[in-house]
Amino acid sequence: MNTPKVTRPKFPKGYVDKPVSFLTWDWVAAQLTESKHYWLCSVRPNGKPHVVPRWCVYVDGKIYYDGSPETRHARNIEINPHISLHLESGSEAIILEGIAEPAGKPSPELGKKLSQAYKKYKGFGYAPKSNSWDGGGLFVFTPRQCIAWSNFTQDPTKFIFEVE
């Protein structure tokens, strides 16, 4: 993953007039790694939004999630792969935009990394093995930009990623 360009999000006058700091991508990556609940927003073929909670893992600069290709969001991304993804907190916000697509069969090395990362869901009764996605059902989200803050008036930060 390339190092993102760091800038400020644009807000209307009066929202964030004197921010004092920037967040680091390391801070964002830690939140993405530790979080258990993500929200994914895709677009239906008729143009209406579709939002669904997802269990995800952050591995090698990308977000992976799994599920049936028959789900609404999976069918949506077949037609329009542009999605938004965010965590559940509004006070420590992370709002990502990017591309989601089927990941295909992961390499044995990636399968192990994913299985290790998914251990955070063991308490919820979900602990996939490294070969759980050999038959499909794995999706990958690649961020293109991220707006984040830990204190809205102090450190709103925008990260922009080069398209690989």
Image (cartoon, rainbow, N blue to C red):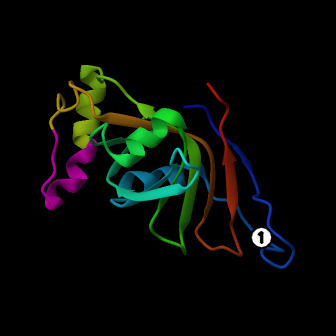
When the figure is inspected, residue 149 is found, relative to residue 56, above or below; the finding is below
Q: Could you say where residue 80 lies in the image, as x and y percent from the top left?
A: 55, 38
Q: Could you say where residue 59 lies in the image, as x and y percent from the top left?
A: 39, 38
The amino acid pointed to by label 1 is Pro
**Which residue lies at the image location 61% right of the left edge and 24% below the top edge?**
164
**Which residue lies at the image location 55% right of the left edge and 60% below the top edge?**
94
Q: Could you say where residue 75 lies in the image, as x and y percent from the top left?
A: 41, 39
Q: Residue furthest bottom?
A: 14
Q: Quadrant of residue 147?
A: bottom right
| Residue 100 in the figure: left or right of residue 97 | left
**Which residue lies at the image location 52% right of the left edge and 44% below the top edge?**
45
Residue bearing mark 1: 19
Q: Residue furthest front?
A: 46
When the figure is inspected, residue 133 is found, relative to residue 15, above or below; the finding is above
From this viewpoint, is residue 69 visible? Answer: yes
When the figure is inspected, residue 163 is found, relative to residue 40, above or below; the finding is above
Q: Quadrant of residue 5?
A: top right
Task: Give the magenta part as a residue range.
Answer: 117-128
Q: Nearer the viewer, residue 89 or 156?
A: 89
**Which residue lies at the image location 60% right of the left edge and 31% below the top edge?**
2
